Amino acid sequence: MNILDNTASYLAKSIRNNHKDSASEEVLFYSLVIVLNTISIIFIVSMVGLITGNFLESITALLIYALLRYFSGGVHLNSSITCIIVSSFLLISIAHIPVTYWYTGFLLDLISLVIILRLAPQGLENVSRIAPKYYPVLKLISVAIICSNFLFHSDVLSLIFITQAVSLTTPAHRLVDYLERRGADQ
């Protein structure tokens, strides 16, 4: 167990010991890992953005990536620390990589749109309580989010959308599987 898991475990035991009517320790642990992951990513990305003068871009990356990911799904990392590192790195990079919207950003939006139309939503089975019968609605919402950038022309949004879209692809899933198997072997 890593420091984040240890903290979540300690808090789950403490909550359970002090509030007998609370959820099971396992449910509390799982929920706390998600909350601690989210807080860690928000803190890291926000601080780097604040220090580098890219705070607005960092906050945009955090919010819009989370929004699109909620509706479209994507690959999930099993390790909480790996999730924090990879997510923070991607979001910090997105906030700091300059891209000209015309033509690069526009092309990224088109590619994202095609991938989302073909693959979204994906990977929501174990992390969402949304019934599969609503998946077509999730796809439409994801498409609408991406299409909004044809009005805004934001390079940050283009990078967010392509990053999220790629997380739906088979190569992204294979890369995560490979990295997790490699990490388990060590």
Image: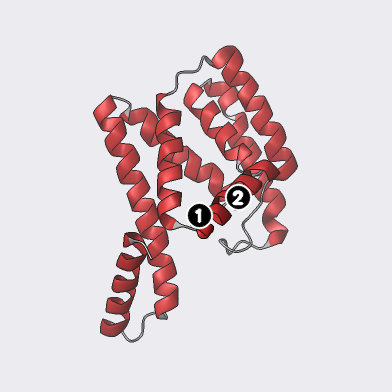
Q: Nearer the viewer, residue 56 or 30?
A: 30
Is residue 43 positioned above or below 37 on the image?
above
Residue at 66% across / 63% down in the picture? 131
- Amino acid type at mark 2: Tyr
Is residue 131 positioned above or below 157 on the image?
below
Q: How is the image coloured?
A: secondary structure
Residue at 61% across / 45% down in the picture? 175
Query: Could you give the CA–CA distance between mark 1 and mark 2, rounded to whole angstroms?
Result: 9 Å
**Labels 1 and 2: the sequence-earlier one:** 2
Q: Position of residue 132 (x, y in %)?
A: 70, 60
Drawn side of residue 169 relative to residue 90, left or right: right
Is residue 30 positioned above or below 80 on the image?
below
Is residue 50 positioned above or below 67 on the image?
above
Say which quarter of the image contains residue 106. Answer: top right
Q: Position of residue 19 (x, y in %)?
A: 29, 83
**Tag 1, which secondary structure?**
helix
Q: Is residue 34 visible?
A: yes
Q: Is residue 73 visible?
A: no
**Tag 2, which secondary structure?**
helix
Drawn side of residue 6 relative to residue 89, left or right: left
In the displayed orientation, state which residue is furthest to the bottom.
20
Residue at 34% across / 29% down in the picture? 56
- Amino acid type at mark 1: Gly
Say which quarter of the image contains residue 118. Answer: top right
Residue picked out by circle 1: 183
What label sits on residue 178 in the rendered view? 2
| Circle 1 Cα neighbour tier, 10 Å, few/some/many (<14 / 14–19 / ≥20) | few
Q: Position of residue 52 (x, y in %)?
A: 28, 26
| Circle 2 Cα neighbour tier, 10 Å, few/some/many (<14 / 14–19 / ≥20) | few
Residue at 40% across / 62% down in the picture? 33
Q: Which image quarter is the N terminus in? A: bottom left
Q: Position of residue 83 (x, y in %)?
A: 45, 50
